[in-house]
Image (cartoon, rainbow, N blue to C red):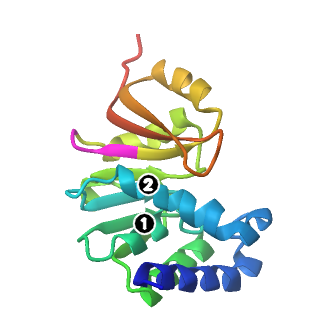
Amino acid sequence: MDEVGRDLESYSALLRKWQPVQNLVSRETLSAIWERHFADSLQLVRHFKPADRSILDLGSGGGFPALPLAIASKGFDRHFILVEPTTRKVSFLRTVARELDLDVNVIGRRSDQIDSRETPVPDVITSRALAALPQLCAWMEPFFSEKTRAVLHKGREHVDELQETSALWYFDVVINKSDTDPGGVILTITNLKRKSAS
């Protein structure tokens, strides 16, 4: 087994150890952790560019997709900032990052409590199962620059969410089918800008 596989095994063991107290993932998915969480997270690797250095993950929860991506990014000079307001989950994320020697910084606040000047301008913003897209855009927008891309997991409701979002925001989007969820997609959003109220 390679280093990525060993690190994922260690992460899985920590997740199972903390799960009874923290409720890090839904109980139904714990037995399918490799497919439902690790593979689902790692499919984003192909949406990264070699020049991507700063990754911002909003609502990190149990660490998906950010921690598997940080594990897969060892040796790529990538820094991950994980935003998670729940204190116990922050402790878990920091424990995994420390034990697996990941280039990860965990901020224990909500994204709307963070001044975007506190963090590097992200090349990529990730988020999984945090909020509907219009709300997600409001949380992402302060961190967005011309070079930033949001790479987001979305389910079968993505068509409606994109329609709602386009009423409030300008953006470009590329839609790719999910490798792990038959009804899911990976959205890559660029050029995000709020429409002015008329």
Q: In this view, does 112 lie above or below 32?
A: above
Q: In which quarter of the image is residue 173?
A: top left
4 in magenta: no
Q: Nearer the viewer, residue 105 or 39?
A: 39
Residue appearing at x 63%, y 63% in the figure: 35
Residue farthest toward the right in the current orientation of the protein: 28
The numbered mark, 1 or 2, whose residue comes first in the sequence reads 2
Residue farthest toward the top in the current orientation of the protein: 198
Q: Is residue 82 above or below residue 138?
A: below
Q: Is residue 53 left or right of residue 94?
A: left
**Residue topped by disc 1:** 69
147 in magenta: yes
Span colored in magenta: 146-150
Residue appearing at x 45%, y 37% in the figure: 137
Within-10-Å neighbours for mark 1: few <14, some 14–19, many 20+: many
**Residue topped by disc 2:** 44
Residue appearing at x 65%, y 38% in the figure: 183
Does the magenta stretch mainly form a helix, a strand or a loop?
Answer: loop
Amino acid at circle 1: Leu
| Viewer can see residue 20 | yes
Residue farthest toward the bottom in the current orientation of the protein: 99
Q: Is residue 5 left or right of residue 193?
A: right
Q: Nearer the viewer, residue 55 or 112?
A: 55
Residue appearing at x 48%, y 18% in the figure: 167
Amino acid at circle 2: Leu
Q: Is residue 105 above or below residue 182?
A: below
Q: Dividing the image into 4 quarters, which one contains the C terminus?
A: top left
Counting labels gives: 2
**Element marked by disc 1:** helix
Separation of residues labelled 1 and 2 (CA atoms): 8 Å
Residue farthest toward the front in the current orientation of the protein: 1
